[in-house]
Image (spheres, helix red, strand yellow):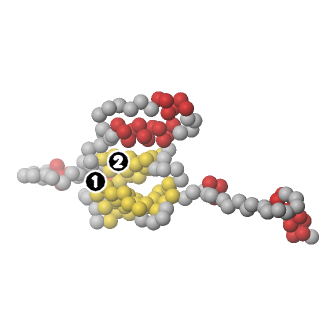
Amino acid sequence: MTHIDLTPLYRSTIGFDRMANLLDSALRGEQTSNGYPPYNIEVTGENAYGITLAVAGFEEDELNLQVENGVLTVRGKKASNEDDKNRRFLHQGIAYRSFERKFNLADHVEVRGAELKHGLLTIQLVKEVPEAMKPKTIAINGKTSGTAIEHQEAKDKTKAA
């Protein structure tokens, strides 16, 4: 695979370094990931998403979810069990190994909750854009005398009286 140099992007943009880092890591691929545990990412609503991880064999207290700097980290650490040490397997295909899976979250995406049911960990995510960042409709003043500010000041004076 060819290496893409994103240095010119860093030189000509300010404040987009996180996006450039995400792009750079996506192009390199996840070298540390071994595909465990398998997961799904789905759209559950207009601004709602869900991540489902197959974590069969793990209990709630063996799983840890953490969000830091826009990265959701899911960790699983299987508690050691004395009964498992005494068992002899002819074939062991069920993976009870520890894992760490990271997901980069977009701006304004928040984790709303998580549920462990039937060996599937489901994480609910919601994208909430702050009011200040939502699109606003600006009224265009027609051929009227005065400015919009003068009209607003006049309305405010009549309301106060």
Looking at the rendering, in which quadrant would you find the N terminus? Answer: top left
Location of the C terminus by quadrant is bottom right
Residue 107, percent from left and from top: 52, 50
> How far across and down, in percent of the image, does residue 39 sit?
31, 55
In the picture, residue 114 is in which quadrant? Answer: bottom left
Work out whether 132 lies above or below 71: below
Residue depicted at x 34% and y 46%: 100
Q: Name the residue: 38% across, 60% down.
A: 42
Specify whether 95 is left or right of 157: left
Viewer-side residue, 134 vs 123: 134
Residue ID for mark 1:
38
Q: 10 Å neighbourhood of mark 2: few (<14), some, or many (≥20)?
A: some
Residue 87: which numbered mark, if any? Answer: none
Disc 2 secondary structure class:
strand
Q: Position of residue 73 (x, y in %)?
A: 40, 48
**What's the residue type where badge 1 is placed?**
Pro
Q: Which residue type does callout 2 highlight? A: Arg
